[in-house]
Amino acid sequence: MEKEKYKILVVDDSNSCRKAIINDLSPLDAKFFESTDGRHALISALKIKPDLITMDVEMPKMNGFEACKKLRGNKTTCDIPIIMVTALASKSELEKGFEAGVAEYFVKPFAKGDLYNYVKRLFSGREAEKSGKAFIGSNDKNSSNIIRMALEKNGFDISEYENAMQLLGSLEDETDLLLLDESIKGLNPYELTNLIRRQKEFEHIPIVYITEKGDPLKLVKALDMGANDYLQKPFWDRELIARANALVKSKRLFDVVQAQNKILETLAITDKLTGLYNRHFLEEVIDKEFGISVRHKRPLSLAFLDVDHFKKMNDTHGHQNGDLVLEHLGQLLQKSFRVCDIKARYGGEEFVVLMPETSLEKAAAKMEKFRQALEKYSLPSLDGRTQLQFTVSIGVAGTEQAIQTKEDLLRFADESMYKSKENGRNRVTVHQSGQ
Ligand code: GH3
Ligand code: MG
Ligand code: MG
């Protein structure tokens, strides 16, 4: 016979109550075990390790609260979800149960299907595709149990930590939610929140504080330190879920906006045709690199490139082949220079290579090498019928030439490029200082 998927321990001193519970849960693929008092329930739970326990309150030998506490206190049984099924339902009774580690209450007599729906959600939540990643930082086994069960039921993937430093070491920027109990060891929760918030990638992880009932100042402090929300013990798991879902939803929205911003940032700094940086970004980088070069007396060189007779290329082979040439030139620049060199399309058929930590002599040699390689290069036209060939005129300038401003660096390189054009194109001209 095929084995049932789940084991459920039903603890109640009334035969009819046990029958009603088992009857309600019977559509589940579960094997049922029965106990008629708390003490027997403890022994059974240790032996069978059920996936769920339903617990009556008033029972002989050991009542439900005591049994809950004992189950929570034992390593083998501490993680088993306990549902309290009771005729008593005063607020203080409920609180007593949550304090003892009860996941949910059902008041007898309950409507048919209520309990079943709850348990079904609990079990399917565990198996469902995870809807989020939650971290629990707590040294209070009862509250972390309630939190874990409530979140698991709602499809969260859970990681639990008793120690603040371990938690911090394992935190990932994809963490969707952090529930921080003030009982956490290692650091107090305020210090931990502060450390988390100081790291840029963790800046937006929602943090919920779990505190003992009482001191409102604690809550104010928690919110001041960067927590997003709080819960006071004992809390209702539905409240926890409602708050958790709201926080995760806004975190997800934030993640989407952030990803879109990244794309927009990339679009804003790149040239669409060539994939190189655009002029706007280049000017920002020149500004920064020029400052570094002056402050640290390090060489910075800049080359200005212009495609020769490009108008003729368009006229002869069409604008689309012209675009193809520019695209290839972009790729060749990308491949031929260091990662730290800034390769940019300045506009039209003009390009700039900014070379930090590079002497004028070295920069000129690099550009000459590139020019020669280009001279031999050809690419097939779009229709494949012709080979397209092109050359560039280049001008180079560098900060070693007593250049005072970043505008001059660009201007002198541009002027040198024009000298290359005047002297017959397809050549490199180095700026001569004092001219
Ligand atoms: P020179 O050797 O003196 O630089 O001659 P040139 O023809 O390259 O220079 P000119 O400034 O007269 O012409 C530049 C041409 O580049 C004109 C323009 O249509 C073309 N051009 C500018 N941007 C693009 C582009 O994105 N795609 C294509 N296909 N052509 C472009
Ligand atoms: Mg031009
Ligand atoms: Mg040109």
Image: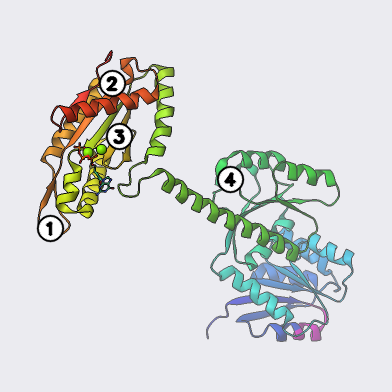
- Find out whether residue 58 is within the magenta segment: no
Q: Going 41% across and 38% down the picture, which residue do you hit?
A: 280
The residue pinned by badge 1 equals 384
Other residues around mark 3 within 10 Å, as few (<14) / some (14–19) / many (≥20): many
**Looking at numbered disc 2 in the image, what kind of residue is underneath it?**
Ser
Question: What is the residue that sits farthest to the top in this orientation?
Answer: 434
Return the disc, 4 or 2, that comes first in the chain's sequence.
4
The residue pinned by badge 2 equals 359
Looking at the image, residue 297 sits to the left or right of residue 126; the answer is: left
Other residues around mark 1 within 10 Å, as few (<14) / some (14–19) / many (≥20): few
Q: How far apart are marks 3 and 2 (CA)?
A: 16 Å
Please report the bounds of the magenta region as a residue range.
12-20
Q: Where residue 121 sits: x, y (%)?
A: 65, 74
Q: Is residue 414 above or below residue 201?
A: above
**Looking at numbered disc 1 in the image, what kind of residue is underneath it?**
Gly
Residue 105 appearing in the image: yes
Looking at the picture, tell me which residue is in the foreground, 186 or 243. Answer: 243
The residue pinned by badge 4 equals 202
**Looking at numbered disc 4 in the image, what kind of residue is underneath it?**
Phe
Toward which corner of the image does residue 289 lie, by quadrant?
A: top left
Q: Going 42% across and 48% down the picture, which residue do you hit?
A: 267
Return the disc, 2 or 1, that comes first in the chain's sequence.
2
The residue pinned by badge 3 equals 352
Looking at the picture, tell me which residue is in the foreground, 136 or 389. Answer: 389
Q: How far apart are marks 4 and 2 (CA)?
A: 41 Å
